[in-house]
Amino acid sequence: MSIATNYAHLHARITKAAKEASRDPETITLIAVSKFQPQTAVLEAYAAGQRAFGENYVQEAESKFASLRASHPSIQLHCIGALQTNKVAQAIRLFDVIATLDRPKLAHALATEMTKQQRWPDVFIEINSGDEPQKAGIAPTDLPAFITLCQQLHLPIKGLMCVPPAKYDPTPYFNQLTKLADAHQLAIRSMGMSNDFTTAIHCGSTQVRIGTALFGARQRAIQS
Ligand SMILES: *Cc1c(COP(=O)(O)O)cnc(C)c1O
């Protein structure tokens, strides 16, 4: 199936899920996750109407999008992968959204570098929904204190993001993220991927991050 066909199907499914949940489909943004996809795939999605893209690795994002962004200024680029502090300067130059703020050290590094560059991409806090020891993110119980830190650092926190534990029904985790976002008056809830985005929409997602259902299989296995 072509990317344009997948794009149309995805929008139909987003609209259907939104209507089932009595929500306005316009309040849900599709983020096209283009990691391990070639620039030609990005351009195909762009031609179909896609504008927001997500990348996991700063280096890959830079090589794929740096020149594209100059020629296609309406592209919006989201960092959705773990961000190392030594990549923060490059990330703030490149991305419009940093969706993976997951630790105090990174909060400090982002604040310092944003001030230095005078550039403030939107920031989402990544929640470790299942409190999984091997996974990045802020534990739900630590969120209030972490938000206070982010406020002290004047970080532009706009939302929450999560990748729930793979082996369980994601519904309770998605509902938890919506509750946390509401409690802290954060408008954006980035949750839902190819396999579970309709569930995420039912639970209040405002940004679904979709790779394989749009682009097909990735060209390499995911590195960690
Ligand atoms: C790769 C990735 C996605 C997209 O996954 P698909 O299952 O291909 O839709 C979404 N979010 C994050 C954080 C990812 O790493």
Image (tube, grey):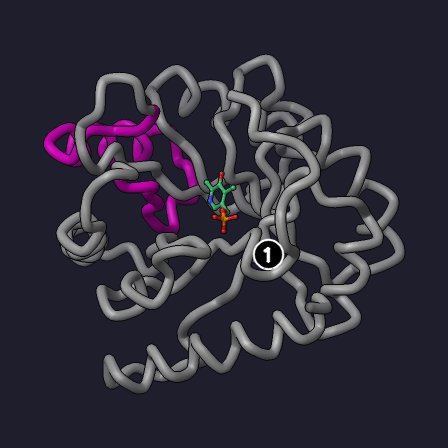
Label 1 CB-ligand 1 distance < 8 A: no
Residue 204 occupies quadrant: bottom left
Residue 84: x percent and y percent? Answer: 53, 17
Residue 219: x percent and y percent? Answer: 70, 38
> Which residue: 82% across, 60% down?
72
Task: Look at label 1 and name its amino acid.
Answer: Ala
Q: Which residues are magenta?
A: 136-164
Magenta span includes 156: yes
> Which residue: 65% across, 56% down?
215
Classify residue 68 as left or right of residue 198: right
> Which residue: 22% across, 50% down?
170
Magenta span includes 158: yes
Q: Which residue is mark 1?
A: 32
Classify residue 121 as left or right of residue 67: left
SS under mark 1: strand
Residue 19: x percent and y percent? Answer: 31, 86
- Res 177 seen here: no
Classify residue 172 as left or right of residue 210: left
